[in-house]
Image (cartoon, rainbow, N blue to C red):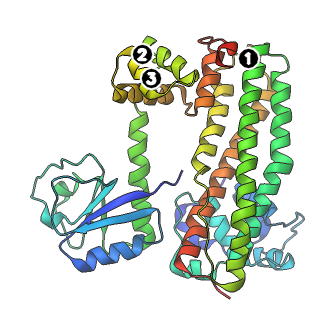
Amino acid sequence: MAKLDSKSERFLSPSMKMADLINSEPGLLNVVNHCGMTLGFGEDTVEECCLRRGRDPYTFLTLCRLVLFNGYVLSEAEFGRVKIDEVTDYLRSCHDTYKDSWLPVLEEGIGKVLSCRPEAQRKVISEFFGKFRDELKHHFEVEEQKIFPSLYEIGRRGRGTLKLFSEEHGNIGENIQDLINLLLKYIPYGTSDPDVIVLLSHLYSLKRDLAVHSRIEDFLILPLVKGGKNHE
Amino acid sequence: MNERTRVLIISPSEIISSGLKAILAHTEFVVEDCLVDVPDSADSDMILIDPVITSYNSVFSFDVPVVAIIHAAYDERSLSQFSEVISIYDRPQAMIRKLRKVVSGASEDDSLQDGRELSPREKEILVCVAKGMLNKEIAYKYNLSIFTVMTHRKNIAAKTGIKSIAGLTAYAILQGLIDIESIK
């Protein structure tokens, strides 16, 4: 897979073809999805695809950079141009995707994988997953009820206060890694089971996406609000 | 995940300290103090220091990463004793990226300890953790210091790759170390 190197991080441009961008960095497929864009890009550029959906191309590309480059640090100019409303929409859409599509898929996958396992294993893993799922949903609820409304308010009025993002992010990342390790290291499968591979791939994707999600909250939203660099 | 890193800046230059403080203002690096000379002890997570005020071959007694802030050409060998070197001509993004690397590097060192199987003592402690016992209670039961219990717990997490108590409980059951009924 052709990876953009760190030198090219500034060269993701609005005039690139959207399909070329996704082909070179398939990880951005999730960003496109969370930004509400639908496939069938044809030969359209990033800018055209964004504008058609009423999205700011600049904010979209900033999100892409945060996703692609771990440790990416925004310049002051970038902070000044990002639209906070659109980032909030993005975060909200992530939550919906996790709740409505990813978690049910994981739950089904775990059910499948465990169906032929001894009772004790089944019980232990499904209880652990249940706890993880409930904590994640609770965390989303708190953000949706307490944090997103203030973010929209700040986006509208250019100022406002924000209660800090919950400090549970670290725990959530930890729990999903625990689940991965339990399934990867401590369940003796005996035979090769394609369902386990599919399940683990999904867990890794969720883990990556959640890490990006909290990176956006910590390195984009928090400095934006703290620095008072909100426009309009 | 992105915890605050408390930073101490040691530089005789007010301009350098203030400049660094401004650059770090919107990041997870919290500048707790700016000093003009090396203190006897420091209670921060990272120290940024101007190498002009360290003696030529001084070995640092601090147990946290020490980063050099350079503003002129400087001897390579003495710079090699620092965890990282930032130049006042670095772009802010580059500077922050270097500091983040130092932080993640420091935590990776901790996990280098991962041997293979859990030792008998680690297994005993794991069982206690799974049953919900506090460090204090575990220390009392095995006549260990709380610090030793914490070290064992760190090693258990490093070896198994499992950090949460719920995860460790699940691990203990899967490994047959405890019975599923005994934790109800």
**Amino acid on which the number 2 mark rests in the picture:** Lys
Q: Residue at x 67, y 32 (%)?
A: A179
* Horizontal arrangement in the rendering, residue A32 relative to residue B140 (left or right): right
Badge 3 sits on which subunit? B
Q: Position of residue B159 (x, y in %)?
A: 49, 26
Q: Position of residue A56 (x, y in %)?
A: 74, 79
Report the residue marked by disc 1. A189
Q: Position of residue B56 (x, y in %)?
A: 9, 57
> Mark 1: which secondary structure?
loop
Badge 1 sits on which subunit? A
**Within-10-Å neighbours for mark 3: few <14, some 14–19, many 20+:** some
Badge 2 sits on which subunit? B
Say whether marks 2 and 3 touch (CB < 8 Å): yes
Can you tell which quarter of the image residue A221 is in?
bottom right
Q: Residue at x 73, y 49 (%)?
A: A138
Report the residue marked by disc 2. B141
Report the residue marked by disc 3. B137
> Mark 3: which secondary structure?
helix
Marks 2 and 1 belong to one chain: no
Identify the image quadrant of the C terminus of chain A: bottom right
Q: Is residue A137 visible?
A: yes
> Mark 2: which secondary structure?
helix
Q: Nearer the viewer, mark 1 or mark 3?
A: 3
**Amino acid on which the number 1 mark rests in the picture:** Tyr
Mark 1 vs mark 3, CA separation in Å: 36 Å
Say whether marks 2 and 1 touch (CB < 8 Å): no
Mark 2 vs mark 1, CA separation in Å: 36 Å
Q: Residue at x 73, y 75 (%)?
A: A152
